[in-house]
C-alpha cells in the first residue's frame, strides 16, 4: 500500500479518528434515552456519526416523529457524555506517533470536525495538544457540514494547500464522502462503522489504525 503522491498537509477528523470518543457518545446516548424515556437504537446512533448536528436533528425527528423529545435528549446526552469524558478523551492508537512524525516532516495539519470550537479546544487542552494543529475548522466555519465537502475545503484553504495535496483522515462514511468530494487523498480508519463497497470506492486506502498512516506517510518522504 502506498499513497499516490506525497501529502503537503494532513487534515484530521476528531471524534472516532483522533480521539476514542464515539464509544462514549454511543453509551451516553443510550443512557440519556432511558432517562428521558424515548426510543434510541444503536443502529440509529450509527447513522448520526459523522454528520452535522442540524442534519442529525432533522433525521431524528423524521425517523421518530415530530413529538420526539429531541431537546431533552440532547441536553441529557451531553450531560452523560461530559461525565464519561471528564478525565479527558483517550487518543486513538498511533495518533501521538503520527503528530510527532508530522512535526519531524514539517507538514501542516488541521482538524475538520462537526463539533464546536469549544469542544475541540477542551479535548486538545486536556491532553496538551492545543499547539499541535495549525488550524481548526469546526461548526460555524462552513456553510454545509459533512458529507458536503465544505469542512475539508475550508481546512485546505486555511492551510494554503491545494485539496489534491491534502491527506484527509476519517472514520465515518459521511466524513469519507466529505473528504473525497473535496478532492483529497482520503484514508478511512474505521472505528464503529465498517466501510461499505461505496466507501471503499471513495477512499484512497482503508487501514486499521493511525500507525498504518504513519508508515504510509514515511514511505512518501
Image (cartoon, grey):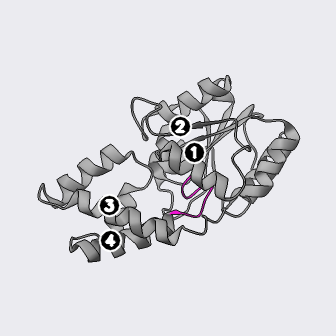
What residue is at 52 percent from the left and 46 percent from the top? 118
Residue 22 position, x and y percent, is 50, 63
Q: Nearer the viewer, residue 126 or 200?
A: 126
Position of 189 relative to 179 (above/below): below
Image quadrant assignment for residue 41: bottom left
Local secondary structure at mark 2: helix
Check residue 217 for magenta coloring: no
Closest to the camera, between mark 3 and mark 2, is 3
**Distance of mark 3 from mark 1, alpha carbons?**
35 Å
**Distance of mark 4 from mark 1, alpha carbons?**
34 Å
Closest to the camera, between mark 3 and mark 1, is 3
Provide the residue designation for mark 1. Answer: 203
Label whose residue precedes the other's in the sequence (3 or 1): 3
**Distance of mark 2 from mark 1, alpha carbons?**
7 Å
Residue 75, numbered circle: 3
Residue 175 position, x and y percent, is 49, 46
Q: Residues within 10 Å of mark 2 (few under 14, many from 20)?
A: many
**Distance of mark 3 from mark 2, alpha carbons?**
33 Å
Label whose residue precedes the other's in the sequence (3 or 2): 3
Label whose residue precedes the other's in the sequence (3 or 4): 4
> In the rendered view, does 215 fall on the left or right side of 114?
right
- Magenta residues (range): 14-21
Closest to the camera, between mark 3 and mark 4, is 3
Q: Are marks 2 and 1 in contact (CB under 8 Å)?
A: yes
Q: Residues within 10 Å of mark 3 (few under 14, many from 20)?
A: few
Position of 162 relative to 178 (above/below): above
Provide the residue designation for mark 4. Answer: 32
**Distance of mark 3 from mark 4, alpha carbons?**
9 Å
Provide the residue designation for mark 2. Answer: 180
**Distance of mark 4 from mark 2, alpha carbons?**
34 Å
What residue is at 39 percent from the left and 33 percent from the top? 144
Q: Are marks 3 and 4 in contact (CB under 8 Å)?
A: no
Amino acid at each position: 500500500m502506498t499513497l499516490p503522491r506525497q501529502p503537503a498537509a494532513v487534515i484530521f477528523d476528531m471524534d472516532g479518528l483522533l480521539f476514542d470518543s464515539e464509544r462514549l457518545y454511543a453509551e451516553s446516548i443510550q443512557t440519556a434515552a432511558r432517562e428521558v424515556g424515548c426510543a434510541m437504537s444503536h443502529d440509529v446512533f450509527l447513522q448520526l456519526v459523522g454528520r452535522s448536528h442540524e442534519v442529525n436533528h432533522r433525521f431524528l425527528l423524521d425517523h421518530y416523529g415530530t413529538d420526539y423529545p429531541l431537546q431533552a435528549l440532547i441536553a441529557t446526552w451531553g450531560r452523560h457524555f461530559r461525565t464519561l469524558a471528564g478525565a479527558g478523551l483517550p487518543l486513538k492508537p498511533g495518533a501521538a506517533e503520527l503528530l510527532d512524525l508530522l512535526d519531524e516532516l514539517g507538514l501542516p495539519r488541521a482538524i475538520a470536525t462537526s463539533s464546536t470550537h469549544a469542544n475541540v479546544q477542551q479535548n486538545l487542552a486536556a491532553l496538551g495538544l492545543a499547539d499541535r494543529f495549525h488550524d481548526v475548522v469546526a461548526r460555524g466555519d462552513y456553510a454545509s457540514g459533512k458529507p458536503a465537502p465544505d469542512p475539508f475545503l475550508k481546512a485546505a484553504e486555511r492551510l494554503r494547500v491545494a485539496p489534491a495535496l491534502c491527506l484527509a483522515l476519517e472514520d465515518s462514511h459521511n466524513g469519507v464522502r466529505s473528504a473525497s468530494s473535496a478532492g483529497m487523498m482520503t484514508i478511512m480508519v474505521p472505528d464503529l462503522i465498517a466501510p461499505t463497497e461505496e466507501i471503499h470506492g471513495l477512499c484512497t486506502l482503508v487501514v486499521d489504525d493511525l500507525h498504518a498512516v504513519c508508515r504510509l506517510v514515511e514511505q512518501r518522504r
